[in-house]
Image (cartoon, helix red, strand yellow):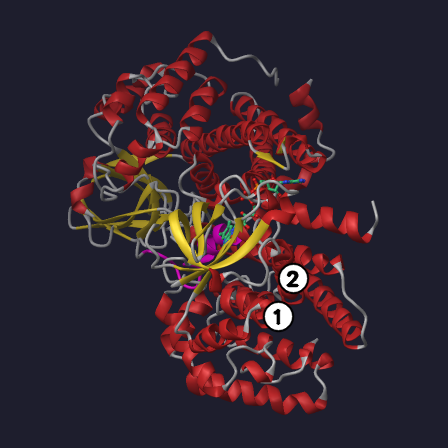
Amino acid sequence: MTDLLVAPEDMAFREEIRDFVATHLEPETRRKVSLGMPLQREDFLTWQRSLHAKGWVAPAWPAEHGGPGWTARQRLIADEEFFRLHTPPLPGFGFKMIGPILMRFGTPAQQARFLPRILSGEDWWCQGFSEPGAGSDLASLRTRAVRVDGGWKVNGTKTWTTYAQYANWIFCLVRTDPEVKKQRGISMMLIDMASPGLTRRPIRLMDGTEEVNEIFLEDVFVPDDLVVGEVNQGWTYAKALLEHERLGIGGIGRSKHLLGRLEEMATASGRGDDPTIRKRLTEIGIDIMAVESTTMRLLAASERGTQLGAETSLLKIRGTEIQQALTELALEIAGADALPDRESGQGQAPFEAVVFQFLNWRKLSIYGGSNEIQRSILARQVLGL
Amino acid sequence: MIRFDAPSEEALLLKDTAMRFIADNYGLEKRAAMLAKPADAVPAHWTEMAELGWLAAPLPEACGGLGLSPTDVLPLLEVLGAGLILEPVSPAILGCAATIAAALPAETAADLLEAMLAGERIEVLATGGASATAPAVTATWTSGSWTLSGKAPMVVGGAAADIVWAVARVDDALGLFRVPADAVALTGFRLFDGQTAATVDFDGVSCTEDQLFPMDDTALVRGTEMALLARLAEALGLIEALYRTTLDYVKLREQFGRPIGAFQSVQHRMADMFIHCEEVRSMVQLAAEAMDGAPADLRRQVHAATWVKLVDNGRAVLRDAVQLHGGMGMTDELIVGHMVKRLLMLIQSGGSREDWLSAAAPSLHNSREAEALHA
Ligand SMILES: Cc1cc2nc3c(=O)[nH]c(=O)nc-3n(C[C@H](O)[C@H](O)[C@H](O)COP(=O)(O)OP(=O)(O)OC[C@H]3O[C@@H](n4cnc5c(N)ncnc54)[C@H](O)[C@@H]3O)c2cc1C
C-alpha cells in the first residue's frame, strides 16, 4: 500500500532511512521494541543521540530550529520505517508538544535556552495537564498560581504524568485567575522538576509498569521568565498543541509494525495458514489502509492550503481502535501461551509481552482526549450537532 | 430439563460466608502482601477454606464432600472469582478432586481425598497435552515398576502442590498416577493475574503398582467439565463485579459538573454492559444444569457455546470497565485492574475461541435435543 503512495523520488529517501537504522540501532533495544517490552530511559536516549547526530531527531521541526526539513510525506515514510525497523518510539513531550509551543509562543530567550536541549536529550520534558479532578474536563483544573515578587507561587496536584521519573522539566497548566470563565484564567508555565516543593509519587499500572506519576506542587516558585506567552492564555496554547498533534496521531507506523508481528506470531503458533486468522489479519490490514489513505488525503488537502479542523479527530479514534484490535488479535493467537507473568521467566516466545501490550494500550483510547470526547468533538464541530 | 432454579439455602449460605470472608481477608493490601511471597509458598487461607466447607462443597457425599449440585456451587464460585482469591480452589477441587471422585470407587476416593478436604494438602491434576484425552504423560512397565515420561507445561494451581496426579497413557488406556510433588521436577511460577501455576516434568519418575489407578474416559470428561464450569462461574462473578464497580464509578465520578453517568454515550455503554452480564449469567446457569441430565454431545455443545459467549462478552466488559474508569482503570490501585487481569486470564486459559466455536457449531441451530433441554 505505501509503495503505491511513495513517490519515486522518495524511494532513495526510504533507503537512506533503512541504512541508517541498520547501522545505528542497538540489537538489544531492537529486540525489546520488537517484542513490545517496556523501555528504560537509556533505551530512548541512546537512540535519540544517534538521531540527533544525524540531524533527524525532530522530523517535524523547521530547519531553523534544527529539523531535517522533510516534507510531510517524507515524515510519514520515516515514521513507518522507524516503526517497522523496531526503533524506540521517542516520547513526544519535547518534540511534539512543548517544542512547537515555544517556537510559536515562546520568547527568543526561551527558545534559545530550551529548544537545543530538547533535541540533544539533555532535557526530558513531561506534561502536567491532568489533575485528579480534571481529566476529560481539563479546563476545570485547580492547580493555583498566585503572584509573588518576581514570579508565581504554585500549589496543586498533577497526575498521570508520563515518564516524570525521567524528566527534569515539566510544562504545566495552572489557574492564574479564578474569577473569569474557566478557560480564560489558565496559564502555561515551565517548571524545573528540581524546584523546592515539587515531589513525585509513582503510580503503578495494572500491567506492572510505573510509567505514570502523581506530582505534588507545594509553594513552588516559578519566575516570570518561565511563563509561556501571555498570562491567562494557556488554554489557547494547549489547544494549539493538540491541533499540532492530530495528524500524527493515527499511529499508522505503529499499527503496521504490530500487524507484521502478528504474522510472525501466527506462524510461531502453527496457525499461519489458519483461514480465520488470515481473514482477521487481512481485515485489520484493510482498516489500516483506510486510515492511512485518509491521513494522506487530508495531508494533501492541507498542502493545497485547506485549513484542517476537528475532522482529524477521526484519525485518533480509528487509529487507536485499530491498535487496540491488534493487541486483542495477538491475545487470540497466543491463547494459553500468554498466561505466564512477564517476570516469571516462563514466557513463551514470541508471546511474552502480548498481555502487557493489551493492558498497556488500553490507554490509547483514554489519553490525548478520550475516544468518547473525540466523538463528541466530531459531532459538535464537524457535524454541527 | 433446564429449570433455572433458584439456588438452595445451603448454596446461599456458603455464598454469604464467602463474601464476608473475602471482605475480611482479601483487601488489596492484604492481597498484595500475598503476591509478594514466592509462587510456591503455601497459600495463606487454604486451611480456613477447608474449614468453611468450600473444598468439600462440590464433591459427592460418599467421597467426603457436601454433595452440592453443579448449579448450587455456582454462587460460591462466583464470589471466589470476583474475590480474586489466590488459593487454587477451582483447579484442586473441581479439576483434580472431582476427577478422582468420578474415577475411583467412592471409598477409595474418600480415603485419598481426606487430607486435602481437611486443608492439610494441595493436590492437582496434570493433564498436560493439547486435550485432556491426549495426555502429555506416558507410562511404561519395566522390571517391576512404572516409569513415567512427559512434561505438563501448565498446571494451574500447582506451584505449592503436595501431590500431582498425572493423567497418563498406559498401554492403550488412561490411568491416574498419584505422584508426590517431591518426586517430580516441579517449577512454580505466577500467571499474569497473580495466580500460581507450575510446569511439571515427569521424565524418569518411577512409580509402584499401587500408585496407579484405573480411569475411564467418562471420569476424565466429568472432571474436565467440572473444571470448565468452575472457570465459567468465576468469570461470571468477575463480569458481574466489573459491571457493578463501573456502575458505581460512573455515578460518582464527575466531569463537566455532572456525574459521567449522566452522559448518554456512557449510559449506553453501561446498558450494553448490563446486557452482556445477563447473557453470560443465563448461559452459565444453562451449562451448570446441563451437567446433570443432558447427553454428552449436547453438554459439550452447550459448554462450548457458553465459552464463546464468555469470551465475547467478557472481553467487551473488561474493555468498557477500563475505559469508563479513565486513567483510574489503568492502575494497580483500584480493584478494577485486578479483576480485569483475572478475567482475561480465565479467557486466555481456554485457548482459541475458534476451537470453541467449532465445538459449538454442529447442531445448536436446529437441534431437537436442544429443544428437549428446554421442554
Ligand atoms: C497511561 C496514561 C498516561 C497519561 N499521560 C499523561 C501525561 O503525561 N500528562 C497529562 O497531563 N495527562 C496524561 N494522561 C491523562 C489523560 O489525558 C486522562 O486520563 C484523560 O484526559 C481522561 O481523564 P480521566 O482519566 O480523568 O477520565 P475521566 O475524564 O474521568 O473519564 C472517565 C470516562 O468517562 C468518559 N467521559 C468523560 N466525560 C464524558 C462526556 N462528556 N461524554 C462521554 N463520555 C465522557 C471518558 O471518555 C472516560 O471513558 C495519561 C493517562 C493515561 C491513562
Question: Is the shortest distance between ligand 1 and the CB of mark 2 under 8 Å?
Answer: no
Region in magenta: A346-361
What whole-number distance in Å separates the C-alpha atoms at marks 1 and 2? Answer: 9 Å
* Earlier sequence position, callout 1 versus callout 2: 1
Q: Chain of mark 1?
A: A
Secondary structure of residue under mark 2: helix
Q: Looking at the rendering, in which quadrant would you find the N terminus of chain A?
A: bottom right
Residue farthest along the right direction in this orientation: A384
Relative vertical location of residue B49 with respect to residue A57 in this rendering, above or below: above
Q: Position of residue A322 (x, y in %)?
A: 63, 58
In terms of depth relative to the viewer, which is nearer, B169 or A167? A167
- Image x and y of residue A335, in percent: 49, 51
Q: Which residue lies at the image location 46% right of the left edge and 69% below the top edge?
A: A34
Q: Residue at x 30, y 36 (%)?
A: B124
Q: Which mark is residue A104?
A: 1
The part of the image, by quadrant, that contains residue A248 is bottom right
Tell me if residue B143 comes above or below residue B177 in the rendering.
below
The crowd level at tag 1 (other Cα within 10 Å; few <14, some 14-19, many 20+) is: few
Q: Amino acid at mark 1?
A: Arg
Q: Is residue A57 left or right of residue A348?
A: right
Label 2 resides on the chain identified as A
Residue nearest the observer in this picture, B176 or B270: B270
In the rendered image of this protein, does residue B276 appear above or below residue A89? above
Nearest the eye: A44 or B40: A44
Is residue B363 toward the left or the right of residue B293 in the image? right
Q: Amino acid at mark 2?
A: Ala
Contact (CB < 8 A) between labels 1 and 2? yes
Instruction: In the rendered view, tell whether residue B249 sits above or below residue B17.
Output: below
Where residue B195 appears, x then y in whole percent? 34, 40
Q: Which mark is residue A240?
A: 2
Which residue is outermost to the front?
A: A149
Residue B78 in view (yes/no): yes
